Image (cartoon, rainbow, N blue to C red):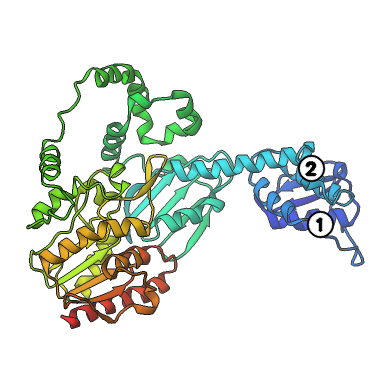
Amino acid sequence: MRVAVLAHETDFEGWRKAARAFRQAGVAPERAAFRIGASGDGLFDERLPLAGPGAAPFSVPKAFVDLAREVILHRSADRLDLLYRLLWRLGGEPDLMKVVTDIDVAAAVERARNVSRASHKMKAFVRFRRIEDEAGERWVAWFEPAHRVVEKTAPFFVRRFTSLRWSILTPDGSASWDGEQLTFGPPATRAMAPSEDEVEEFWKTYYASTFNPARLKTKAMRSEMPQRYWKNLPEAALIPELVAQSAVRTEAMVAAPAPEPNARLARTLSRLNRDGAFGEGFAPSTLDELDQAVQACRRCPLWRDATQGVCGEGPKRARLMIVGEQPGDQEDLAGHPFVGPAGRVLDAALEQAGIDRGDVFVTNAVKHFKHEPRGKRRLHKTPNTAEVSACRWWLEAERRLVRPKVIVAMGGTAALGVLARKVAVTRERGRGIDLSDGAKALVTVHPSFLLRIPDAAARAVERDRFVADLKQARALL
């Protein structure tokens, strides 16, 4: 028996080197063995030179290499033997990886699928708890993955929590991010992680408040949220009681009387329909009247899926108007423009540019949130030209009432609403454009563009350009 010793359970490069040497030396799968670290040799094991310098080189499909990288993370004891058996067979069956019904190929694919599923569950069920160390705030989580996926999955948390210092501890190893570098350490125990923190009660309250008994499907829930993970999920303690109460709560929801219709909307619709709303005879005389009228707008279909129309806010005679694309998810729920992540980026940039947001009228080219549902999330969709054109009536009404001297259009959709033509933002940004009412427009990027730049250095450069555009708008005043 020929033996290769690997450094650790997921030592892919070590297995790859040893497996290549075995095959070049003509060692059949039943004569090859892979051991981890100092796991010991068998009585008849041989650790001998495996292949001479004249051994013939060979290649394997990339699909096999990619599959092997995943399978080695599986916890099965025979995974290394399975991979070598496939490697050996590829010598005489070069198209083996395309035969999905082959017993060895199917077994490897299934194990890779299990590894991918374990990585997905890790992303979903890691729960961080706050601690204090010598450097300040740190977030620590204990997790027990079904397979050895810590190193595979850790980069996801770097992207997700770039600005935080965190550690994920598992029985297989640990991953830590200090804000600049991702490092991996030895296995840990449950006792090394905090058992609770002050945020936990808030999280459990939120989880209980979003639990919808009318949509409860226990079989699907256990499939998506396997009970093996429950012991490390703080909200799991609530599940048995929430499930037990679901029937009673559902009956109460069904028996509850329907809410009263929105009286404000009903009055607005009645008056606007009586006065020929949105026709030649209707023109809002105040911003409050415009806000009411938008709630009854049916100029395009976007009102059907939105929570409410979101008009602009700011001084009634602001010299500077800033126009974005459309309300986002948070703006749609709150009824106010630029209160989400993009709004926070805008606030910081305005401050750096020396502009008081309190002096600015902020609005959007489109007044209803266009989106598509994706599970429980609502994903933003860019308004099309017809929707922007339909909503331009409201934007022009806001301009007529506010009478700004300078209008900053953030992004192509906003520029289309302000200028009534398609604009290449990169070509026209940062310069004054004369408008028919005597005001000037300036085109720049939308703050959400800055949020989507993954590289920190590139993001800083673009943020400086965005601030420079706002300073130029201030100069135009």
Mark 1 Cα-neighbour bin, 10 Å: few <14, some 14–19, many ≥20: some
Residue 268, label in figure: none
Q: Position of residue 359 (x, y in %)?
A: 11, 69
Which residue has dot 1 on it?
A: 20
Labels 2 and 1 touching (C-beta < 8 A): no
What is the secondary structure assignment of the residue under circle 1?
helix
Residue type beneath disc 1: Arg
Which residue has dot 2 on it?
A: 99
In front of the other: 35 or 202? 202
Quadrant of the rendered structure where residue 115 is? Answer: top right
Residue type beneath disc 2: Val
Look at the picture and state if 266 lies above or below 472. Answer: above
On screen, residue 468 versus residue 354, left or right, reads right
Quadrant (top left, top right, bottom left, bottom right) of the C terminus? bottom left
Q: Position of residue 108 (x, y in %)?
A: 71, 42
Sequence-earlier tag: 2 or 1? 1
